[in-house]
Image (cartoon, coloured by chain):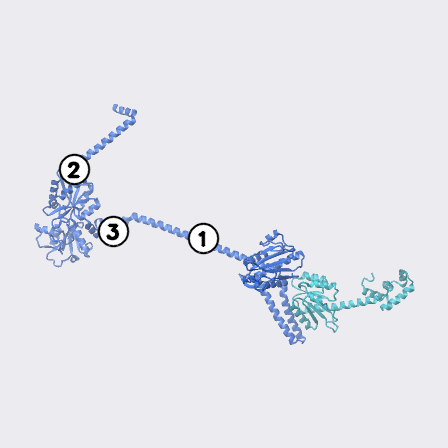
Chain colours: A cyan, B blue
Amino acid sequence: MSPTSLPPTIHIIDDEAPFRRSLLFLLESVGWQAVGHESAEAFLEAPPAFPAGGGCLVLDIRMPRISGLELQRRLKLADSPFPIIFMTGHGDVELAVQAMKDGAVDFLQKPFKDQLFLDTVERAVQLSLERHAASRRHQEARDCLARLSAREHEVARLLALGQTNKEVARQLGISENTVHVHRQHVMEKTGTGSAAELARLILRADPAGLD
Amino acid sequence: MNAHNIVQYSFERHSSMLDLIFKSHVARFCSLAVLLFCMWNTSAYAETDIRLGVLAWLGSEEAEVQWQPLVQQLERRLPGHRIVLRDYSLDELSEALRTGEIEFLVTNPGHYIMLEAEHGISRIATQVSAPSQDPAHVVGSAVVVRSQRQDLRRLEDLQNSRLAAVADDAFGGYQVIWAELRRRGLDPEHGEPRTSFTGFPMPRVAAAVLNGEADAGVLRACLLERLEREGTIPAGTLRVLSPRPDIGHCGVTSALYPGWAFAAARGTDPALSRAVLMALLTLPPDDQGQSWSVPADYHPVHELFRELQIGPYAFLRETGWDSLWRRYWPWGAGLLLVLVVWGIYTLRVEHLVQRRTQQLSSALAEHHRLEERVQAGQEQMDHLSRLSILGELAGTLAHELNQPLAAIGNYARSLLRRQQADNLSPEALRQAAEEIASESERAAGILGGIRAFARKRSRVREVRDMAGLVEETSALIRGMLARAPLIELHTTLPAAARQVVVDPLQIQQVLLNLFKNAWDAQQAAGSDAPIEVLLGAAADGRCTVAARDHGAGLTPELQAHLFEAFFTTKPDGLGLGLSICKTIIEAHGGELRATSPSNGPGLVLEFSLPLATPGATCQKPDHA
């Protein structure tokens, strides 16, 4: 169970209405929010926002028109925050392998035990919350760095790489005093106290930012 | 020697001519010699003897006395002939005829009948006696008894008495009375009466009766009267038993038969016979009043002999198998042979009939067995086809079944969870229970459908909506195949014009095959266009079904082989699907055809099915 007080929201996408309803009934039994969608199209028409309590998608791998795999592909393109769990039938192992390669959290072969389903869903919800937090920190770092001017951005990157004021001044062809002023502004704007902190911030915003 | 030489010489010089003359002379000489000899021989007989045999029924002396007047009369009328009279007993007379000792004979009618049959003699005159002058009623017999025997009045009274007769082959002396006894139900041959034979001459019989050796005796008619006249027997000592009132001159017990016969032996000169006959007919009655007349009808004698089964009719007694065999063995053997041949033939025919029947019935059984095997093969192939489709789609069918099972499991466990968490509301319980019930029914339905699909089945015909069948089949394939193709049904036929009479499972099998093939073809061609199904009305009161895919299509060559068994374009195909489909459609009176579509690539498979109400096709679809 998520430590947060808000319940997670699970989206079940399966063309089999009775089975879909049974999953909703199961999820509601443990106090979670659950929403059913009868097709991929129906889900894509009104994509839900990421819920505060976390959440995930449970997809049937076989569906008419837009199949589970196709939906996964489209959501990945749209950078959806929801982790995906696939439900497969007997003999769909190849499809499941493909789904895992494409980033699915897990797959459940029907028929599955309720506990396995709930555990898997919970793991996915946890993952969604972690991913969501990471995503939020990344966004904050980017927002923070966005406040720097272009010159300040250059100075911050070189400092994060461990260069002294003197080396920065020489590399940029400016005076050491100017570098010092820029350094003061960078530290103030980003709220960092050292070159090491600055380096962590830059990497959080862009893992390739110090290359 | 010389003569011989000359003859030889002549013979050699004029062989043919001499030969002719010589031969003709010899022949002429021989004929002449034979003729002369015969003439001499005949004339010698004619000059000297006419040998006449007579039956000496009263003994030799009596015969001489009796017949001598006749001999003299004949000699007088046949000048130049000497009549040699010879007397014989019955057997001797027969022997004399056999050896040719006599030319003529005189005997009683019964004996004549026998000799006629044995030696071919022919009668030329019959003796008549003075009172009747009727040659047909001359000979009769009298049964005499001693006058004082008052107990003997009729022939029937003789049943337990002793009867004396001259001989068993004497006509007037026995046989005539024998017949009379038989006509009265007595049988002397079996002791009714006991009969003894005295032998000739006949007066011995009278003596036997007189001296008590016999109770009665058989005498020739008028013999008793004669013996009395001659004084041999005192008058009144013997009397005739039941004398016939219609015969006045003598006492006669029996019917009268033709008189004695004067007969010519076989081989007697006809001219001589004629001369003797003429002489006989012109003879005056002798002192006994007897004369000769034209031959009488001896038929009554024949009848008598037949009755007694003697003489020529003795064979009638031979009713035993032995005698029959002796008489008829060639016929019997022939009949036996025919029977045997017929039996063999019948057996052979029977044998042949049985063998042919057996062959026929075994041929029929073989035929029947073949038919059954063909049908079994057909059903087996049907079954195989369904199984192969099932096999290909087994995984997806499992998926289909998993859905309701998984749903049921989910509801059940959810209920447990809620109960454990103590938050199970009646509303939730009701919802879960309803879902569980409906899902278990659905699972059962799927299982039943699969079982029915896989089971071998016999012919079924139901009225079904063709559009419904297409929908059901597309639902089936959607459940079976991941990325199942969309199946679009195009029809504007009213519901009444879509009611087909079919085996629904078989038609679903056909549609499933066609859809699966279409899907395979589109997969291969990378097309995701929907499979189109078009229902239409055929002119002959049938509903047409056409399924079109957007695959690569088939060349006409491949189309020609499409419906052959074990023909396939798929690397892992059995090649049975379409051939089974074709069989199914043909069983519904239709034809499964493959054509190329008029627009674009792909293949159209089309067939027709019989409508429940053919009249419904009158309503043409709006757009078609």
| Residue receiving disc 2 | B45
Which quadrant of the view contains residue B453?
bottom right
Marks 1 and 2 sit apart, C-alpha to C-alpha, by 85 Å
The three-letter amino acid code for the residue at tag 2 is: Tyr
Q: Could you tell me which secondary element the residue under label 1 belongs to? A: helix
**In the rendered image, which quarter contains the N terminus of chain B?**
top left
Can residue A89 be seen in the rendering of this structure?
yes
- Residue neighbourhood size for the residue with mark 2, other residues' Cα within 10 Å, grouped as few (<14), some (14–19), many (≥20): some
The three-letter amino acid code for the residue at tag 1 is: Gln
Q: Could you tell me which secondary element the residue under label 3 belongs to? A: loop
Q: Position of residue B483 (x, y in %)?
A: 66, 61
Chain of residue at mark 1 = B
Asked if B310 appears above or below B416 in the picture, the reply is above
* Residue at point 28%, 27% (across, down): B17
For marks 1 and 3, the one nearer the N-term is 3
For marks 3 and 2, the one nearer the N-term is 2
> Is B379 left or right of B127, judged from the image as shown?
right
Q: Nearer the viewer, residue A15 or B260?
A: A15
Asked if B206 appears above or below A83 in the picture, the reply is above
| Residue receiving disc 3 | B318
Q: Could you tell me which secondary element the residue under label 2 belongs to? A: helix
- Same chain for the residues at labels 1 and 3, yes or no? yes
Chain of residue at mark 2 = B
| Residue receiving disc 1 | B359
Q: Nearer the viewer, mark 3 or mark 2?
A: 2
- Residue neighbourhood size for the residue with mark 3, other residues' Cα within 10 Å, grouped as few (<14), some (14–19), many (≥20): some
Q: Are marks 3 and 2 in contact (CB under 8 Å)?
A: no
> Is B153 left or right of B524, judged from the image as shown?
left
Q: Nearer the viewer, residue B585 or B194?
A: B585
> Is B340 left or right of B39, judged from the image as shown?
right
For marks 1 and 2, the one nearer the N-term is 2
Q: Position of residue B604 (x, y in %)?
A: 61, 56
